[in-house]
Image: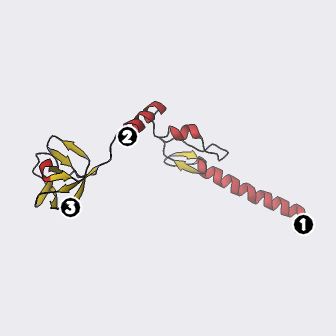
Amino acid sequence: MNKKDYLIISTIVSLFFVTSTTIHAKNCIKGKPCGKGCIALDKNCRINPNGIRNKKSASNESGFTNSSRKQSVLRKSKLRLPKVYTITALSVNAKSAPQSKEITAHYNKGLHVFVYEIFQSWARLNNMQPEEWIELKHVKLK
């Protein structure tokens, strides 16, 4: 095989690989092309054709404007860390909401718990679902 044949074959093979990746990106079944892959139709592609990430669309990918994004960060920064309390009663049942009858957990005397919120005479212990509320008279600040 001479150099001319080698050059022709290598050109054909390289064109095959380039077109196959381009065809894959352009024929997205459920989404839209983005770089070498596909993304959902409601998402913004953060990769331009040169393979470089686009910073403007990355910041607005979630659909928030810059002003609403700043407001959410400011709101989150106002939240306080939970305080550590100690259970003072012999046994306490945590409920799903203040004045509720649904019991979600059981705590014994001397246990240290985090209190995330105080509402009237109730303390919220769990920051996740299901919520756990106990009466404030059963705990004291450590």
Relative image position of residue 78 (x, y in whole percent): 35, 38
Q: Residues within 10 Å of mark 2 (few under 14, many from 20)?
A: few
| Image quarter (top left, top right, bottom left or bottom right) of the C terminus | bottom left
Q: Residue at x 27, y 50 (%)?
A: 83
Q: Residue at x 32, y 43 (%)?
A: 80
Is 119 displayed left or right of 5 in the figure? Answer: left
Left or right position of 78 against 110: right
Type of colouring: secondary structure
Cα separation between marks 3 and 2: 29 Å
Question: Which one is earlier in the sequence, the residue at label 3 or at label 2?
Answer: 2
Tag 2 residue:
76
Q: Earlier in the sequence, mark 2 or mark 1?
A: 1
Residue at disc 1, secondary structure = loop
**At x 11% / y 58%, what residue is drawn?**
89
Q: Position of residue 34 (x, y in %)?
A: 57, 46
Q: Residue furthest bottom?
A: 1
Q: Secondary structure at mark 3?
A: loop
Name the residue carrying label 1. Answer: 2
**Identity, as a three-letter code, of the amino acid under mark 2:** Lys
Label 1 crowd bin: few (<14), some (14–19), many (20+), radius 10 Å: few
Q: Is residue 6 left or right of residue 95?
A: right
Q: Which residue corresponds to mark 3?
A: 111
